[in-house]
Image: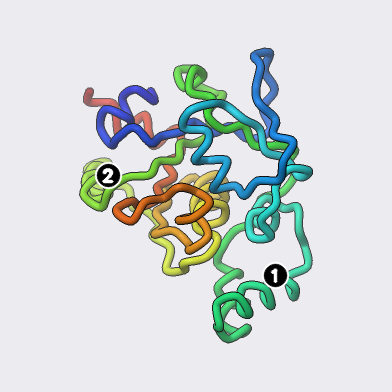
């Protein structure tokens, strides 16, 4: 599966599983990481993120590890010189996952196991986004395109794709373009496994 996705849309593609256990060795970073940093690392090696090694307040909120909404609103508003009311309303539209033990990233060899991969995260060019939207339309599907520039990889892609089972597109947040390795010509896309199968079915 992942080979087909990379053939169609480029090499920056990672397979993601939520809460799964398996026997193979997986890297569990001891250092604190942002979720977008972990996604970027997972293009090359598998790793596991959990409450203890996830640093970013936005990612912790998106994974259900942080519940102080007032502090989160104040942090985003203060860091970006935005009205708190706008931030609070925006966060209501970005899902929070529940009962998360860990997130397995970069489990590419499991991409052919039908029930193990939950979603794929890709960094792609705008031209590739056009192709994805076109293929979705052929399948009678729509993508969710986030209007918000924060919580781009963690909330608007991973959490949204997983919880709502919809292809999710984000233009990235400033932090993710530094920590997460998203380049100036790239957009973030999350694709549920069941949708990915339909996108590559004609290959």
Q: Kindly identify the residue that appears in the image at 52 percent across and 65 percent down.
A: 150
Q: Is residue 112 left or right of residue 128?
A: right
State yes or no: discs 1 and 2 in contact (Cβ < 8 Å).
no
Q: Residues within 10 Å of mark 1 (few under 14, many from 20)?
A: some
Q: Closer to the observer: label 1 or label 2?
A: 1
Q: Is residue 55 left or right of residue 166?
A: right
**Residue 40 image offset from top left, x and y in percent:** 49, 40
User: What element does badge 1 sit on?
Assistant: helix
List the residue tagged with mark 2: 132
Q: Is residue 88 left or right of residue 198?
A: right
In which quadrant will I find the C terminus?
A: top left
List the residue tagged with mark 1: 72
Q: Kindly identify the residue that appears in the image at 69 percent across and 78 percent down.
A: 74
Q: Kindly identify the residue that appears in the image at 48 percent across and 28 percent down.
A: 44
Of residues 56 and 89, the one nearer the viewer is 56
Q: Identify the image quadrant of residue 121.
A: top left
**Residue 154 image offset from top left, x and y in percent:** 56, 52
Vertical position of residue 10 compared to residue 27: above or below: below
Q: Please, which residue is most extreme toward the top here?
A: 23
User: What element does badge 2 sit on?
Assistant: helix
Q: Identify the image quadrant of residue 91.
A: bottom right
In which quadrant will I find the N terminus?
A: top left
**Residue 124 image offset from top left, x and y in percent:** 32, 45
Q: Residues within 10 Å of mark 2 (few under 14, many from 20)?
A: many
**Residue 130 image offset from top left, x and y in percent:** 22, 50
Of residues 40 and 120, the one nearer the viewer is 40
Q: Kindly identify the residue that appears in the image at 65 percent across and 22 percent down.
A: 26
Which numbered disc, 1 or 2, marks the residue that appears first in the sequence?
A: 1
| Distance between mark 1 and mark 2 Cα atoms | 33 Å
């Amino acid at each position: 599966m992942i080979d087909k996705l990379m053939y169609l849309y480029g090499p920056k593609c990672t397979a993601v599983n939520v809460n799964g256990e398996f026997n193979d060795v997986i890297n569990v970073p001891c250092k604190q990481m942002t979720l977008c940093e972990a996604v970027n690392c997972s293009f090359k090696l598998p790793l596991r993120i959990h409450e203890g090694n996830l640093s970013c307040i936005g990612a912790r909120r998106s994974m259900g590890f942080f519940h102080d909404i007032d502090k989160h609103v104040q942090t985003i508003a203060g860091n970006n010189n935005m009205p708190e009311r706008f931030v609070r309303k925006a966060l209501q539209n970005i899902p929070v996952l529940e009962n998360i033990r860990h997130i397995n990233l970069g489990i590419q060899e499991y991409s052919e196991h039908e029930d193990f991969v939950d979603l794929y995260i890709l960094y792609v060019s705008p031209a590739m986004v056009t192709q994805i939207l076109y293929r979705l339309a052929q399948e009678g599907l729509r993508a969710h395109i986030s209007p918000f520039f924060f919580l781009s990889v963690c909330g608007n892609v991973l959490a949204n794709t997983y919880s709502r089972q919809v292809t999710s597109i984000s233009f990235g947040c400033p932090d993710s373009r530094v920590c997460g390795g998203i380049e100036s010509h790239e957009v973030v896309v999350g694709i549920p496994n069941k949708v990915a199968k339909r996108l590559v079915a004609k290959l």
